[in-house]
Amino acid sequence: MRFEIEAGTGFQEQIILGFHENATDGFDRRYDQFAQPFDFRAGRGEGFGHVAYFFYPENDPESGGLIENEPSPSRLRISTVRPRLDMAWPLRIAYLFDQDTQIEIRWNTSEARGLEGFNVSLHVPLGQWISLTEESSHIFNASLGIHPFLVDAHGPPGSLPAEEPPASDTLVLVGSFAAYGAVIAIILGLRWMKRRQA
């Protein structure tokens, strides 16, 4: 299933999730693909200031953090997992510019319906769940930092998760702490570069 990420700054990127019986819970070169690395030149008004990726810090504990110009198995553009009753893809959108903007996440509802036997939803901040078969996009205001989301697929068919996140949503909680640390690293890095330029 494909997701299009587009920002008011003109940035556009596609990320893909899926499942395969031969995939593992870790990084699979056959089924997964690295996301583009972070580019801190955005702090100087150069380079690309956005990165969309699925985040798995356990894939690469040593270099799963904020590393410039280096691909990491913890950050994937294509993420494929083993099929099971409950599957989750922790989605992160990094925005590295000082000026706020709107970012839109789009998807094809027919692709979500094609995952027969599963309810597929997007968990966004403030505890909201969005059905990927009923809605086709989500827009949010992005400021400097990393914005965490979760794509959840669970079966058998039934109602959407309750307002309280289910137990499987611990990925969001764990990822959020990592995201906060990354946000601090981004801000400190940008300030350091600005001091050097001064």
Image (spheres, rainbow, N blue to C red):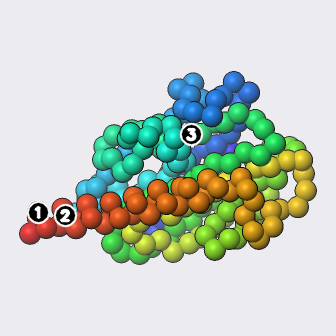
Q: Quadrant of residue 135?
A: bottom right
Nearer to us: label 2 or label 3: 2
Q: Position of residue 16 (x, y in %)?
A: 61, 44
Tell me what residue is drawn at x 74 percent, y 27 percent: 21
- Observer-nearest of 136 and 54: 54
Q: How far, Cα to Cα, is label 2 from label 3? A: 32 Å
Q: Amino acid at mark 3?
A: Ile
Binning the other alpha carbons within 10 Å of mark 1 as few (below 14), some (14 to 19) or many (20 upward) gives few
Can you identify the residue that label 1 sits on?
A: 196
Q: Residue 78 bears which disc, if any?
A: 3
Q: Amino acid type of disc 2?
A: Trp
Which mark is first along the chain, 1 or 3?
3
Q: Residue at x 63, y 66 (%)?
A: 124
The N terminus, quarter of image: top right
- Which one is nearer the viewer's eye here, 96 or 185? 185
Q: Position of residue 172 (x, y in %)?
A: 60, 58
Residue under label 2: 192
Give the quarter of the image for residue 63.
Answer: top left
Mark closer to the chain start, 2 or 3: 3
Q: Quadrant of the C terminus?
A: bottom left
Contact (Cβ within 8 Å) of mark 2 with mark 1: yes
Q: Nearer the viewer, residue 26 or 51?
A: 26
- Please state which amino acid type lies under the numbered disc 1: Arg
Residue 106 relative to residue 143: left or right: right
Whole-angstrom CA distance, mark 2 to mark 1, is 6 Å
CA–CA distance between discs 3 and 1?
36 Å
Q: Looking at the picture, does residue 147 appear above or below residue 98?
A: above
Kind of element beneath mark 1: helix
Residue under the point 36% across and 51% down:
66
